[in-house]
Amino acid sequence: MGDESAVSVHTGASPTETVLACIDTWRRAPLPAEVSARTRQVVLDTIACYIGATAMDAGRRLLAFAERSSGPATLFPLRHRVSAEAASFAASSMANLLDADEALFNRGHHACAIVMPALIVGGVYGTSVDDAMRAIAIGFEVAARVSLSWSYYTVESDGSVRGADVTGLSWIVLGAAASIGLLRDLDGDAMRSALGIAAYGAPIPTNSNWHVAYPPDSMTKYTLYGALAQHAVSAVELAALGFVGCQNVLDGPRGFRRLIGATTWDDDVLRDGLAGTWTIVQTGLKRYPACRLWHGALYGLEQLVRDARLAPADVRHVEIDLALLHPTQMRLAREYPELTEISAQFSVPYGAAQVIERRPPGPAWYRPDALSSERTRELMRRIDVAVDPVMNKEAAEEVKRVGHYGFRLPWAVSVTPASGTTLRASGTNAPGDPFVPALDITRRETEEKFREFYQQAYGTGAPPAFLRLLDAPDATCAELLGALG
């Protein structure tokens, strides 16, 4: 974002003071046009994922949970108002339920627990959409900087990745609290308390279990995003009432990052972020409702099948080669988990079969008829997935270089049709990588995703008013959320 960026705020202060100084600086300056546009796109993408999840069994259970409360918040498709906390819990959990939401360098999904509570709280307090976008962009930046400032895995001598014994995604609660705090116009002291209260109530570092049990056998996945959002709402409301929280939440050798599993950290990242840009501009968007680690292979397979006009019966064999650095991820190359609407998101053969069957990405991938389809299972038996040692070495070097999985994940795919002429594709990136211009997902493509997910969930076209209000200069969050119905 050049000279307009959310660039470093040079305070020479403690980590907590640095974050608070950044928030104070950003809240007083206009959002750059690029950041405003990207934030709206991320919001639209998050809402699309939420809408898709309303058609899922886990989503219906979360909505039923929210519906047991009462309060001032609206949440489509519920027919009565509910509490902001319960709505935020359900909506944030649901926005990640399809695994189709944004992912910043594969470190976690920030937006689901920031976008949804910000819009819900904004709807309660009459906030404009413009002010909500500003708060969301700043909250995303806070969470991302905290995330990028510490390490929770190491690359072993054999190139495999070892996760920390304790690790979690609880840092997102700070971004959620920051965004909601801005919507509630908390001053500096109250914002400090809100961050401290939020950290004290964040979920335990459940991502540790992801390093042990993969794919997950529950509906909570790598963390309970709903709990992060719910507690952020409560933390801000407590701070607004004068409840005093921890004043130095990020400071010292036993600060918040250490408590959630940091092995090392770099405070300069809190101050500088990603040089010259906002992280929300760099976060990746998804085409497929599946783990981001093999989106490149699904994309290559989709191009091969489309260009050769192959029907499922025409496909004799598929070979997918991936870089899967973590030992538990490697199981995906050799095992076929029991298919549920959650575990199937982490099955390479299942995702590849959906692509070959030309099923449009979205909740339709995880409907009972798709999960139990014998044709799909027979097709999966023709798909072999291998962990490629050369790709693993390349990916491991990239992780060492940049400290995350973010930039290059090599992949290769080959399709042998009944004709016998093998088709091949390979690459290092996937749709939605903003740092590869040819692969960046456009606003128009995100609008198509919103319409597709809505159509799959409700069998009818998405309301055009929602897209108009998202860009309307005088729209409110209440109007925006109301337009979904």
Image: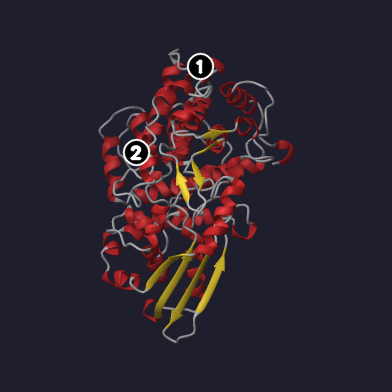
Name the residue beneath numbered marker 1. 247
Q: Position of residue 393 (x, y in %)?
A: 55, 58
- From the viewer's perspective, tell me whether residue 383 is left or right of residue 371: right
On screen, residue 371 above or below 425: above
State the SS at label 2.
helix
Furthest toward the front, the residue is 157
- From the viewer's perspective, tell me whether residue 17 is left or right of residue 96: right
> Which image quadrant: the C terminus?
top left
Work out whether residue 113 or residue 473 is closer to the camera in this orientation and state it. Answer: 113
Q: Check disc 1 and give the amino acid type.
A: Gln
On screen, residue 216 above or below 323: above
Q: Which numbered disc, 1 or 2, marks the residue closer to the eye?
A: 1
- Give me the residue at 38% from left, 59% from top: 332
- From the viewer's perspective, tell me whether residue 428 is left or right of residue 319: right
Q: Check disc 2 and give the amino acid type.
A: Ala
- Give me the residue at 51% from left, 44% from top: 154
What's the CA distance linking mark 1 and mark 2?
29 Å
State the SS at label 1.
loop
- Give me the residue at 67% from left, 22% from top: 12
Q: For label 1, count other residues whose C-alpha is less than 10 Å away and answer few (under 14), some (14-19) or many (20+).
A: some
On screen, residue 124 above or below 355: above
Residue 441, by quadrant, is bottom right
State the count of labels: 2
Dot label at residue 190:
none
Residue 280, by quadrant, is top right
Q: Position of residue 145 (x, y in %)?
A: 57, 35
- Give me the residue at 44% from left, 72% from top: 319
Name the residue beneath numbered marker 2. 90
> Which image quadrant: the N terminus?
top right
- Mark 1 or mark 2: name the one nearer the start of the chain: 2
Q: Position of residue 470 (x, y in %)?
A: 53, 43
